[in-house]
Image (cartoon, grey):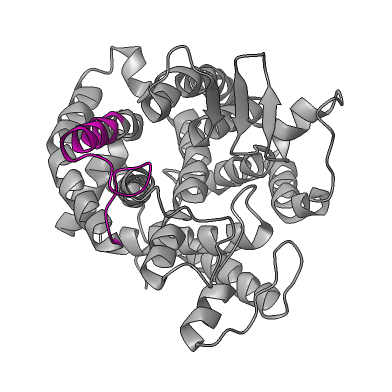
Amino acid sequence: MTTPVQAPPSSQRLLSIDALRGLVILLMLLDHVRETFFLHRQVADPMNIDSTEPVLFLSRTLAHLCAPVFVLLTGLSAYLYGEKYQGKRDVSVFLFKRGLFLVLLELTLVNFAWTFQFPPSVIYLQVIWAIGLSMLALAALVWLPRPVLLLLALGIIGGHNLLDSLHFAADSTLHVPWAILHDRGWIEFSDTLRLRTSYPVLPWIGVIALGYCVGPWFARSASAAERQRYLLLAGAGALLGFVALRLFNGYGEAHWVAHGTHLQTLMSFFNITKYPPSLLFLTLTLGVGLLLLLAFERVQQSKWIAMLAVFGAAPMFFYLLHLYVLKALYLLSAGLLGLNQGNYFGFDGMGSVWLTAMLLAIALYLPVRWFAGLKARRRDISLLKYF
């Protein structure tokens, strides 16, 4: 006789989700330190292999995990929210409210943290905007049957690169909606304000819908063994798909080429497009993310998992806090030490970027833990759940 595998308690069952969210938050912190103190060394999308040193390439490539994993987990968490409350109606209402909240944050507090301009002359519509719009879309899509939603998600992820050649001139009525959906560009809002659609939202709608479809794997009734098997198959399948398409320079991505060294050739192979995220970008990052989720579930007793989960339990609080801390550090450094990299204050090498990111992670751990505890204790304050 065999003993059936029982689903772990809710807190343990969901710890891996918070831990993975915490990991990508720390990778985001590394990338934002780079964007703050290494701004004199801009990187293209995809990167220029001939002019990008390996450590800078590695740092930027690690950061590629952040948006796809976070958006996938947003969809997954939306499903679990519905399981906890009253189903699709509550999920739809919550997604709609939080989506609007995130869009408002992007237009105000987030953009101000990047530009320190008021009133702004430029508003960068970045990842929080994309997540907000994706949540608004999912608020409507959750009413679809799960098989239909899954097919739609996979169709968007796999098929949106067919639209790469479609562009509309600035005077076209389709320019603005298409710039928001798929064609990264500028929107002239007025004579004094421009909008930059840094994160075209269409592929992210596919990712958040996919995350919602993954939700039943984490339902209370699902066994750990079954969930882990699904995570392994999906993660490994995505990575195999990436390798197969990439080896033959398949559709949806700039071709990789052999360089003078094996390391540069390997860099070229993994040099993929984020804006908007190509099919290969998403198969690689989501494949890695699903396997990390599997690994974290299997080592939940590790103290490192618990520490990562602290960051993942209050993601929006951390996001806003670290942006303003970075801006304050930059202004303080530039004021005390002056500009040393052309028009910028910046570090001489990526080693200082990594060190600063590690020190900031340590410094921000306690305030984030405090807020995560407050959020868990004061469930009567509805606003806290948005952070």
Q: Is residue 54 left or right of residue 167?
A: left
Does residue 344 appear anywhere in the picture? yes
Q: Report the side of 53 relative to 79 (left or right).
A: left
Placement of the N terminus among the 4 image quadrants: bottom left
Q: Residue 289: x and y, percent?
A: 46, 58
Residue 96 in the image: x percent, y percent? 57, 19
- Number of marks in the rendered image: 0
Tell me residue 242's x, y (percent): 62, 70
Residue 144 visible? The answer is no
Q: Would you place residue 367 above or below residue 277 in this image?
A: above
Relative to residue 326, is residue 2 depicted above or below?
Answer: below
Q: Quadrant of residue 337?
A: top left
Q: Measuring 82% from the left and 53% from the top, which residue is drawn there?
A: 162
Residue at image coords 83%, 50%: 165
Q: Quadrant of residue 243?
A: bottom right
Name the image quarter holding the C terminus. top left
Q: Would residue 165 be found to the left or right of residue 108 on screen?
A: right
Residue lying at 52% horizontally and 59% vertically, measured from the top left: 285
Depicted 356 relative to depicted 263: above or below: above
Residue drawn at x 35%, y 52% as measured from the top left = 27
Residue 3 belongs to magenta span: no
Span highlighted in magenta in the image: 324-349
Front in this rendered view, residue 142 or 239: 239
Pick whichever, 147 or 264, lies toward us.
Answer: 264
**Residue 359 image point, x, y percent:** 15, 49
